Amino acid sequence: MEVWDRVKTFAGSFSQLKTVLQGSLLRSTVSRDMLRGDSLSRYLSQALSSLSGPLASLTFLASMRDHYNGRYLHEGWASFGSPAEVHEMLRSTHVAVFESLLGLSVIDLARALRSHILSLAEEEARAVALWRELEPYYEMIPEGCSPLARKLFISQLQLALEVLALAPEWSCLQPPGAWPPPPPGPLYLHPYPN
C-alpha cells in the first residue's frame, strides 16, 4: 500500500509539475514572441538611426523589397520574427518614411538630397546628373500609395534635383544656422507722439 501511495503522490506531483511547466512554457513562448517583435523593431530602429537622413532611410527600405513580388525581406532579421512580421514592419516603416518626405518643402528636400549624396562620398554634380537621367526615385515609392502622393513625390524630387543642378550655391540650400536670425532693427518711432 505504501508503494501505491507514493505512486499516487508522484502522479499528483507530476500532474501539478506538468501544469506548472505548461503554464511557464506558454508564458515563455508569449514572452519570446514579444521579445522577438521587440528585437525586430529595435534592430530596425538602430538601422535607420545609423543612416544619414530620410532619403537614406527610404533607399534602405526600398532595397529590402523584392521588386518581383513586393515582399520585404531581411535575411538577418528572420530569426527575430516570422517573414510576415518582418514584411509588415518594413512595409509600414517604408510608408511612414515616404509620407514624412512628402511633407518636406522643395528646399528641405534639396537639402536632404544633398546630405544623402554627400554621405555616399559622391561628387554632387555627377550624382545629380545620374539621378536626373536614371530616375532611381521611382523605385523608392512604396506599393499601394495613392497616385497623387506618387506624383507629388516624383515632382518634388525632380524639382529638388533641378535646384541642385542649376543653383548648387543658392544660399537657401545652406544648412540653417544654430542661432535664429537677428531681429529686425528698431521700429521707426514717430518723432511726435500723440
Image: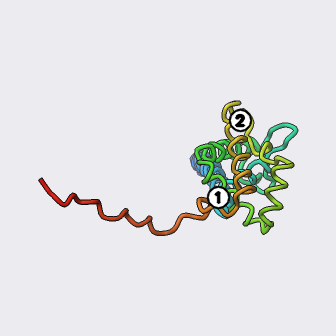
192 lies above or below 27: below
Badge 2 amino acid:
Lys
Label 1: which residue? 111
How far apart are labels 2 and 1 at the CA level?
A: 20 Å
Badge 1 amino acid:
Arg
Q: Position of residue 145 (x, y in %)?
A: 69, 34
Label 2: which residue? 151
The kind of secondary structure element at disc 1 is: helix
The image quarter in which residue 51 lies: bottom right
Point 73% across, 52% down: residue: 161
Q: Is residue 159 left or right of residue 6?
A: right
How packed mark 1 is, by other alpha carbons closer than 10 Å (few <14, some 14-19, many 20 or more), is some
Q: Where is residue 158 in the image (x, y as percent from the top left)?
A: 74, 46
Q: Position of residue 148 (x, y in %)?
A: 67, 31
Q: Earlier in the sequence, mark 2 or mark 1?
A: 1
Point 66% across, 44% down: residue: 98
Q: Which residue lies furthest to the top in this view?
A: 147
Point 37% across, 64% down: residue: 183
